[in-house]
Every structure is written in structure tokens, then in C-alpha cells.
């Protein structure tokens, strides 16, 4: 039986350039954040908010962000919500203190009497 293994090619050694600064990478190549040029381009991010009581439409905020700087601007400003004309007074039921439930008293007393 014959053994047909591929013959490995001899490894080639590439000589580095004889430059004084060739040992160090430039600033962009040394960073491991991915595509630096893509990160530096400004992206517009639009944030929208639902409309509030008394406003016809919601607010919209546009931010232009890159890795170097951030610019905030508003495409549509949210109008101030008007104060309701009628004041809501708390009802008598909610202002009264809640009455204690006595259905658990027997179990509470038993728990107090248990010696630890």
C-alpha cells in the first residue's frame, strides 16, 4: 500500500524593512476597535417619544454621534404640557387608614408563642 501524503512546502521567511519605526505600529493600526474610519464617521440617531397629554404630536430628538464628538439637536421640540384645569382631590376612602385584617391574628399569636 502506497502512502500519498502531500509534501509540505518549505516556509518562506519575509525580511522586515530596516526602518527605525517599523517595530511600532501607527496609532490606527495599534487600536483593536475594528474599522477606525467607520467609527470616525458621524451617524445620525433619531429618538422619538410618544405624545403627552395636551400635545398634538410627540417629541423627536436627533443626535449626530461619532467616536470623536457628539452633537445634540432637536428636530421637533416637545411643547410644554398644559396644567390640567381641574384639580383632582383625593377621595375620602384613600385618605382613611386601612383597617387591620383580623383573620390572621390566630396565626400571629401562635408565631409569637413559639420558643426559638
Image (cartoon, rainbow, N blue to C red):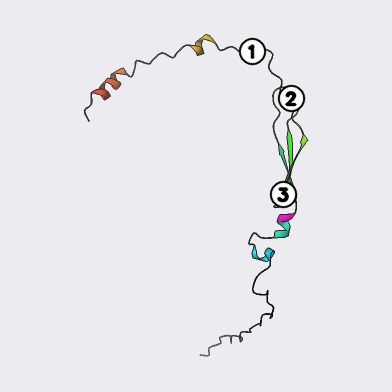
Q: Percent x, y for residue 85?
A: 69, 13
* Residue 9 in which image quadrant: bottom right
Residue receiving disc 2: 55
Report the residue that reaches farthest toward the left.
Answer: 115
**Which of the marked residues, 2 or 3, is nearer the chain's N terminus?**
2
Instruction: Say which mark, if any, is on residue 69.
Output: 3
Regarding mark 3 in the picture, which secondary structure is present there?
loop
Of marks 3 and 1, the one in the foreground: 3
**CA distance separating discs 3 and 1:** 45 Å
Residue receiving disc 1: 87
Regarding mark 2 in the picture, which secondary structure is present there?
loop
Q: Residues within 10 Å of mark 1 (few under 14, many from 20)?
A: few
Q: Are marks 2 and 3 in contact (CB under 8 Å)?
A: no
Q: Which residues are magenta?
A: 39-43
Instruction: Say which mark, if any, is on residue 57.
Output: none
Of marks 2 and 3, the one in the foreground: 3
User: Does residue 80 lie above or below 70 as drawn?
Assistant: above
Amino acid at each position: 500500500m502506497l502512502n500519498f501524503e502531500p509534501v509540505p512546502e518549505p516556509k518562506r521567511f519575509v525580511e522586515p524593512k530596516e526602518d527605525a519605526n517599523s517595530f511600532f505600529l501607527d496609532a490606527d493600526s495599534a487600536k483593536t476597535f475594528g474599522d477606525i474610519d467607520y467609527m470616525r464617521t458621524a451617524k445620525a440617531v433619531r429618538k422619538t417619544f410618544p405624545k403627552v397629554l395636551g400635545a398634538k404630536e410627540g417629541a423627536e430628538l436627533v443626535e449626530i454621534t461619532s467616536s470623536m464628538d457628539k452633537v445634540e439637536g432637536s428636530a421637533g421640540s416637545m411643547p410644554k404640557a398644559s396644567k390640567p384645569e381641574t384639580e383632582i382631590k383625593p377621595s375620602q376612602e384613600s385618605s382613611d387608614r386601612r383597617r387591620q385584617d383580623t383573620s390572621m391574628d390566630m396565626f400571629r399569636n401562635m408565631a409569637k408563642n413559639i420558643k426559638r
